[in-house]
Image (cartoon, rainbow, N blue to C red):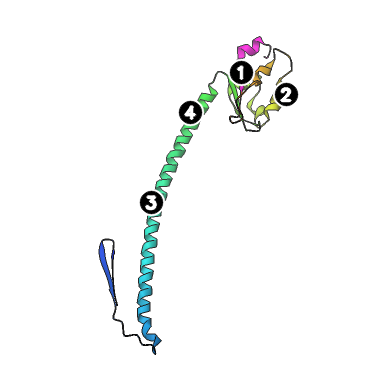
Amino acid sequence: MYSETDRLGRNWSLSAPVQRLAVGQPASILTPLVLLMGLLAGILTYRLVGDQLRLTGRLLQSNEDLSASQSYLQQSRADFLAIFQSMDGGAAFTTPDGFIRMTNRHYLELLHLDAAAVAGKHIDEIRQQMVVNRPGNREACFRVKLPKSIPVWFASCTAAQAAISGAS
């Protein structure tokens, strides 16, 4: 029996003397079967190790990409928070169903509240605590709302407007 294959830039060959197979002697087929099974096991091992090496390389590249993305995300988040906190107008981010996730300091200053008083509360609770339904009150601070796809409430009055309208 003779077999030849080209792997890794080299020709590999396997040769083994095979006796003539006799129907009356099943043991005569044992040697070729053992050789073929060994060859099959070697080929499968080679393929599995190669696949594992390729996957390891891809995983390492993915980890590097993920680390870079996380670093960029952290920097973007820090930039956003710096801009959000330095805005002149007050703003509060809410969940789509109206629960406050984050406010900037101007929002809290306009409503004379602290962060603990509004954290996790529904925007309507804050509105009910702060708004009396008369002209010239803090109701203007709750009027501007973006479309539902962007859950943000803006305090549309500045501190000066709130003082003039009697909101302070």
* Location of residue 35 by image quarter: bottom left
Q: Amino acid at mark 1?
A: Ser
Q: Distance between the Cα atoms at labels 1 and 4?
A: 23 Å
Say which residue appears at 70% left-offset and 15% top-offset.
137
Q: Based on the picture, tell me whether residue 159 belongs to the magenta stretch.
A: yes
In the displayed orientation, state which residue is furthest to the right.
133
Q: Secondary structure at mark 1?
A: loop
* Location of residue 117 by image quarter: top right
Q: Residues within 10 Å of mark 2 (few under 14, many from 20)?
A: few
Kindly check if marks 1 and 3 are in contact, taking CB atoms under 8 A apart as contact: no
Percent coordinates x, y for residue 114 in the rendering: 64, 24
Kindly check if marks 4 and 3 are in contact, taking CB atoms under 8 A apart as contact: no
Percent coordinates x, y for residue 90 in the rendering: 59, 21
Q: Amino acid at mark 3?
A: Gly
Q: Based on the picture, tell me whether residue 161 belongs to the magenta stretch.
A: yes
82 displayed left or right of 163 = left
Percent coordinates x, y for residue 1 in the rendering: 29, 78
| Residue bearing mark 3 | 57
Q: Name the N-terminal-most of marks 1 and 2.
A: 2
Q: From the viewer's side, name the closer residue of 150 and 84.
A: 150
27 displayed left or right of 13 = right
124 displayed left or right of 101 = right
| Residue bearing mark 1 | 156
Q: Name the N-terminal-most of marks 1 and 4.
A: 4
Q: Name the N-terminal-most of marks 4 and 3.
A: 3
Name the mark nearer the viewer: 4 or 3: 3
Q: Residues within 10 Å of mark 4 (few under 14, many from 20)?
A: few
Percent coordinates x, y for residue 20 in the rendering: 32, 85
Q: Residues within 10 Å of mark 1 (few under 14, many from 20)?
A: many
Q: Name the N-terminal-most of marks 2 and 3.
A: 3
* Location of residue 127 by image quarter: top right
Q: Which residues are magenta?
A: 154-168
